């Protein structure tokens, strides 16, 4: 049994009544907030905190092989569990290694906590070149976190941790970094009381009369759901049941079951969906940035009448101007909207048929674009357990089909790199599986996988059920396509030396199979899930053949 899994069986400690090290008080504050999962790399500058985790046994700690991996794991764990998870790094280069992953968590709005050590307080910020010091670690972390806090005295530990957790959880949510010098971590402090997280600001409840009036008068409405609306599943489902068409960003997938008759899924920018928008008399955008990659760099023609719901008061003109912005929590606003609609209101009877036609056109187009890999998408859908998680890295297969298939029935079942960074999928998969004990299917390209093979050891150690669909085209496929399309076919720096993945898998003690034909692949996936542990199914894309379309980056303009 690994240390991580041993900690899962430990009892929650009793309230603290005696002085103890600050590392224990930090663990205590996290326990108050319901934190169950932490990920990190142990170092001399965080050992008091990790020693507290080990002794107290209330928080499961998973040792990652790198700080970027730890932050990505905590990010995904938070997304799928709904509970804040923690990444623990060392100071200086350790914290710096996690910065890119913090940018991803910022982009996704993930309310996770990043704890980092710092050198001894007497030498801090003096510019002496003290070993492990970064010249401006606060500046670094402020640039990639929602907020930054430094604990400077032992008695500050619990109050500052409570403020940090509350800040992360207050909408718009995001990762918060807390820095604790090593001498402060070791210091003994008196009891600081309890009472849980304080100061999580509940958003004001806006007047929604204009929104109710607009939807009541609409006959062919569309509700665009982004990641900020994932908590509104119940209300959005009620609106769909009354004939409101649903389309989502990739981050909003599953807010309404993608098999619902009124759902277009995340086919937001296809020709068929754009044609449907021309017949739409009201679009409500809830909790979405309307990002460039999902709107053909803002060239997607949206309905002229647009209303927006967002917790951010700056959202009204983001990407597309809106007639009005209702500043509030999407779950609250959409629930009140569904309650306030007149009992007799329904969308036009022909609207459902128009949505059905667009759904069919979208699916036919995707199958044509996926080419032979449409069979793999279908296999994933049929083999995925009811509680399975679908995690994807940035790879050609994800851009063409993984962001849209298989259908997702509820929020929290998918994780992907919202910020578009390569190599985060394996780390996200580990965090998602560790936080939920649910099987994970991960779609990862060979280029992205090779950014962090060390985390394969973390996956095996964790004991999670993880099936890696390793899409091996022997290089950076999308970059090759861009070079062909925009650089006269001059290819460079994209052909990668890849290992024998079977030998690599055996070295780490996990299963491996090569898939050079997609007949029977659903059975292979199901069998791998049934075995448990980590399995690499290496999809030989050279043997299977090309996609039905050449993907050369996110579509722009009318393309």
Image (tube, rainbow, N blue to C red):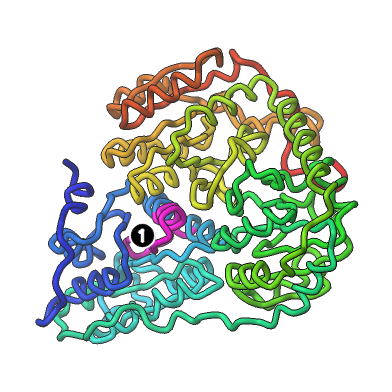
Query: Is residue 482 visible in this depiction of the protein?
Result: no
Q: Residues within 10 Å of mark 1 (few under 14, many from 20)?
A: many
Q: Residue at x 81, y 30 (%)?
A: 488
User: Is residue 240 rendered to the left or right of residue 160?
Assistant: right
The residue range painted magenta reads 74-99
Query: Is residue 492 visible in this depiction of the protein?
Result: yes
Determine whether 524 is above or below 183 in the image.
Answer: above
Residue 230: image location, x then y, percent? 56, 59
Q: Residue furthest front?
A: 344
Q: Residue at x 31, y 58 (%)?
A: 38
Residue 54: image location, x then y, percent? 16, 58
Residue placed under numbered mark 1 in the picture: 87
Q: Residue at x 31, y 57 (%)?
A: 37
Q: Residue at x 86, y 65 (%)?
A: 305
Of 533 and 95, nearer the camera is: 533
Q: Quadrant of residue 205 in the image? A: bottom right
User: Is residue 205 rendered to the left or right of residue 52?
Assistant: right
Q: Quadrant of residue 29 in the image? A: bottom left
Determine whether 503 is above or below 467 in the image.
Answer: above
Quadrant containing the C terminus is top right
User: Is residue 289 rendered to the left or right of residue 127?
Assistant: right
Q: Is residue 75 magenta?
A: yes
Q: Is residue 105 magenta?
A: no
Determine whether 479 is above or below 506 in the image.
Answer: below
Element marked by disc 1: strand
């Amino acid at each position: 049994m690994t240390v991580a899994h041993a900690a899962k069986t430990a009892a929650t400690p009793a309230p603290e009544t005696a002085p103890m090290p600050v590392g224990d008080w930090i663990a205590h504050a996290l326990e108050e907030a319901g934190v169950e999962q932490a990920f990190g790399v142990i170092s001399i500058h965080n050992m008091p905190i990790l020693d507290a985790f080990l002794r107290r046994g209330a928080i499961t700690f998973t040792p990652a092989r790198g700080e970027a991996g730890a932050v990505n794991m905590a990010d995904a764990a938070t997304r799928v569990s709904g509970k804040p998870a923690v990444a623990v790094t060392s100071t200086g280069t350790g914290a710096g290694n996690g910065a890119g992953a913090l940018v991803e968590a910022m982009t996704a709005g993930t309310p996770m906590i990043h704890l980092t050590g710092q050198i001894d307080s007497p030498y801090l910020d003096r510019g002496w070149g003290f070993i492990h010091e970064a010249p401006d670690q606060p500046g670094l972390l402020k640039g990639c976190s929602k907020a930054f806090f430094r604990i400077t005295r032992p008695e500050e530990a619990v109050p500052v941790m409570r403020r940090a957790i509350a800040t992360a959880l207050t909408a718009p949510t995001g990762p918060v970094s807390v820095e604790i010098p090593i001498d402060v971590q070791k210091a003994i402090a008196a009891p600081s009381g309890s009472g849980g997280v304080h100061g999580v600001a509940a958003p004001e409840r806006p007047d929604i009369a204009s929104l109710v009036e607009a939807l009541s008068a609409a006959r062919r409405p569309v509700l665009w759901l982004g990641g900020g609306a994932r908590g509104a599943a119940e209300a959005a489902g009620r609106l769909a049941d009354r004939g409101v068409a649903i389309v989502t960003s990739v981050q909003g997938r599953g807010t309404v079951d993608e098999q619902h008759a009124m759902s277009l899924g995340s086919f937001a920018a296809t020709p068929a969906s754009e044609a449907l928008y021309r017949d739409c008399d009201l679009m409500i955008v809830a909790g979405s940035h309307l990002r460039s990659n999902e709107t053909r760099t803002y060239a997607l023609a949206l309905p002229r009448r647009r209303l927006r719901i967002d917790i951010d008061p700056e959202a009204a003109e983001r990407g597309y101007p809106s007639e009005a912005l209702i500043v509030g929590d999407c779950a609250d606003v959409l629930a009140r909207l569904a309650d306030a609609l007149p009992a007799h209101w329904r969308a036009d009877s022909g609207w459902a048929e128009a949505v059905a036609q667009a759904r069919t056109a979208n699916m036919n187009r995707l199958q044509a674009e996926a080419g032979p890999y449409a069979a793999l998408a279908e296999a994933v859908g049929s083999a995925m357990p009811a509680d399975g998680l679908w995690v994807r890295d940035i790879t050609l297969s994800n851009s063409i089909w993984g962001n849209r298939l298989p259908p997702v029935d509820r929020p929290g079942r998918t994780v992907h790199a919202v910020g578009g960074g390569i190599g985060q999928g394996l780390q996200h998969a580990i965090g998602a599986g560790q936080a939920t004990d649910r099987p994970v299917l991960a779609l990862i390209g060979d280029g992205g996988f090779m950014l962090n093979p060390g985390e394969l050891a973390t996956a095996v150690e964790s004991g999670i059920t993880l099936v890696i669909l390793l899409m091996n085209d022997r290089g950076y496929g999308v970059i090759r396509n861009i070079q062909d399309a925009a650089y006269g076919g001059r290819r460079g720096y994209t052909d990668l030396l890849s290992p024998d993945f079977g030998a690599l898998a055996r070295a780490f003690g996990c299963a491996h199979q090569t898939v050079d034909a997609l007949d029977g692949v659903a059975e292979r996936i199901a069998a791998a899930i049934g075995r448990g542990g980590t399995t690499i199914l290496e999809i030989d894309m050279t043997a299977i053949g090309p996609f039905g379309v050449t993907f050369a980056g996110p579509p722009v303009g009318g393309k």
